[in-house]
Image (spheres, rainbow, N blue to C red):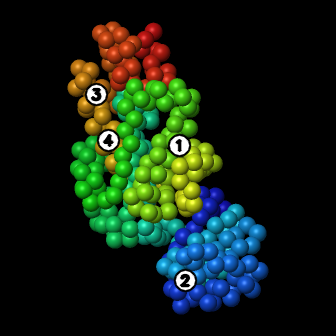
Amino acid sequence: MSKNEKKASCFVANIDLNLSEKLKQDLIGFGFSLSKPPYTLFSGKKKGVSVSLYQSGKLMVQGKEMQEFIEFYLEPEILKNFIFTNPEQYINKTPHIGTDEAGKGDFFGSLCVAGVYADEAGILKLLKIGIKDNKKLSDKKTIAFAKTIKQEFSHHILRIHPPKYNELYFKFRNLNTLLAWAHAAVIEQMVGKSKCSQVTIDQFASKTLISSAVEKKVQNLCLNIHPRAEEDVVVAASAILARSAFLESMERLSEEIGFELPKGASALTKEVGRKIGQKLGPEGLEKVCKKHFQTYKEVLS
């Protein structure tokens, strides 16, 4: 079932606490062993599935075998909706953090990773503003939206300018590992600001690599990692902040270097790179580019 292959390893929903006793008795009937961790009404565990109902009414389900439990019991009996099996029909209004990056495919400019937090009211506000996947937006619109987001939402932007980027790449030796570290650093900041444990990440590498990097900085998070996460409006907002920061870095570096730096890694990029190399040498080029790109070798040759 292709849709379910993209499911998160953690599912969160809010339920009516009047249903708590029914849920508790049903879990006992299903063979769950119950306990009462702090801040919960109860928590149930059996092989492959764990269920925790918090005093706030938040219900968290985790585990490799959670899909069948949610699809055949939780949705029809408790939730009375099918947000897990048919997520495209629902807007995720659960308060959460979203992260995304910009600049990783561009020879020139900084790598920028951004995080945004929004609660239910904030999510509705983002939708009302018209926030959407930044790939569908002009640069001008992206910058305008970013200004609004920064004014109204808790956020954090990590800007890794070329000299530092090249230093970190030399250390990590892998772009995805560097990206995972950067996302984790942003998530650490956002969790500290918002005290939220729900995080949605636009997937750029294996889930294991990303979750491992995050867990080194922050534990006990519910990570939702999947491709095309920009469909989530909070992730879309973070993508806009990251893209805007990248565009700002390109403008600043262009002014500093005295050349108009093109985006991407096109023939024009190589042409401008050769001119910078001829005028300022490899040291000048390294101030504005990502050295591990094949473009760097082609430009210098």
Left or right of 115? Residue 6 is right
Which quadrant holds residue 121?
bottom left
Q: Are marks 3 and 4 in contact (CB under 8 Å)?
A: no
Residue 134 visible at all: no
Disc 2 residue crowd, few under 14, some 14–19, many 20+, Cα 10 Å? few
Secondary structure beneath dot 4 equals: helix
Distance from Cα at disc 4 to Cα at disc 1? 19 Å
Left or right of 86? Residue 115 is left
Q: Is 117 or 272 nearer to us in this picture? A: 117
Q: Which residue is mark 1?
A: 180
Residue ID at (62%, 74%):
37
Mark 1 or mark 4, which is nearer the start of the sequence? Answer: 1
Distance from Cα at disc 3 to Cα at disc 2? 53 Å
Distance from Cα at disc 2 to Cα at disc 1? 37 Å
Residue 87 visible at all: yes
Which quadrant holds residue 44?
bottom right
Name the kind of residue labelled 4 in the image: Ala
Distance from Cα at disc 3 to Cα at disc 4? 12 Å
* Numbered mark located on residue 80 in the image: 2
* Numbered mark located on residue 253 in the image: 3
Q: Which residue is mark 4?
A: 245
Mark 4 or mark 2, which is nearer the start of the sequence? Answer: 2
Q: Are marks 2 and 1 in contact (CB under 8 Å)?
A: no
Distance from Cα at disc 2 to Cα at disc 4? 42 Å
Name the kind of residue labelled 3 in the image: Leu
